[in-house]
Amino acid sequence: MLGITAICTSWATWIGSVHSSKQDELYARGNLDFTHTFFRDQVQNQRFLHDRSLIRDMNMLFIEWQHAKERGNQREFDILNQKSKDMISNTSFYLFEFFYPAWNQSEISQGISVNFNSRAEFVSQVDSQGHWETFFEFLGQLDMQPYWNTFTFTDEDLLWRSFEMVTEGMEHSTKNDVYGFTTVLYAIVLFLLGISNSFKEIRYKKILVVISCAVFSFAFLIMLAIPYM
């Protein structure tokens, strides 16, 4: 009886450690995927806010640019031209890439060829050829919705997978707790069997052995009821 209980105790301890390791692995992977999703959302959100703010500022700048041109204020006009260059230079790569096909398809920019290889070359050519007004008019009529639709703020598949892994980790945690409980029961069995030898009367020994068998049976049934993995 002592040998069987010792073997069952070792088995329950080992299986519990397996579930504990699996729990740690799933928690780590689930939290990593969740963190990745959160970080990606933050990056997307910052770029989205930056680009929306830039488009709004460009449209406002065009209004100021027109007023300066109407008033014939050359100094203000030059300042606004410099602001225009700075704004284009600060345009995100993705937004600048969106401008290229739209520029070629727009009726406003028909017949005007500019280089979209880099923002610096684009600014230099638009400035040297005097096409700022054309660019602002093109921007004012440009439908930005297709570009805004490219932003995806949550990878639902990745987020759902992280939740599934954390849930599975919780299941392993529960199994680990159950196997930990069985090791406690087996320890009680070993204790009762151990002290039974200290009693001289057979009646007390039999009582302790019967209790030990009952506790052992209960612990063994619990182990059978819990899947191995």
Image: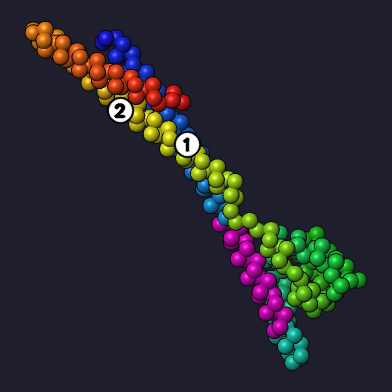
Q: Tell whether 27 sits left or right of 100.
A: left
Residue at the right extreme, as displayed: 111
Q: Tell whether 51 sits left or right of 135.
A: left
Q: Which residue is mark 2?
A: 181
Q: Is residue 56 magenta?
A: yes
Residue at x-position 72% and y-position 74%: 84
Q: Tell whether 179 sits left or right of 56.
A: left
Q: Is residue 79 magenta?
A: no
Q: Which residue is mark 1?
A: 168
Residue 1 versus residue 211: which sits nearer the camera? Answer: 211
Q: Count the marks: how many?
A: 2
Q: Which residues are magenta?
A: 42-64
Residue at x-position 66% and y-position 75%: 57
Which SS class for mark 1? helix
Any part of residue 199 in sight: yes
Residue 90's x, y, as percent? 67, 66
User: What's the amino acid at mark 2?
Assistant: Phe
Residue at the bottom extreme, as displayed: 71
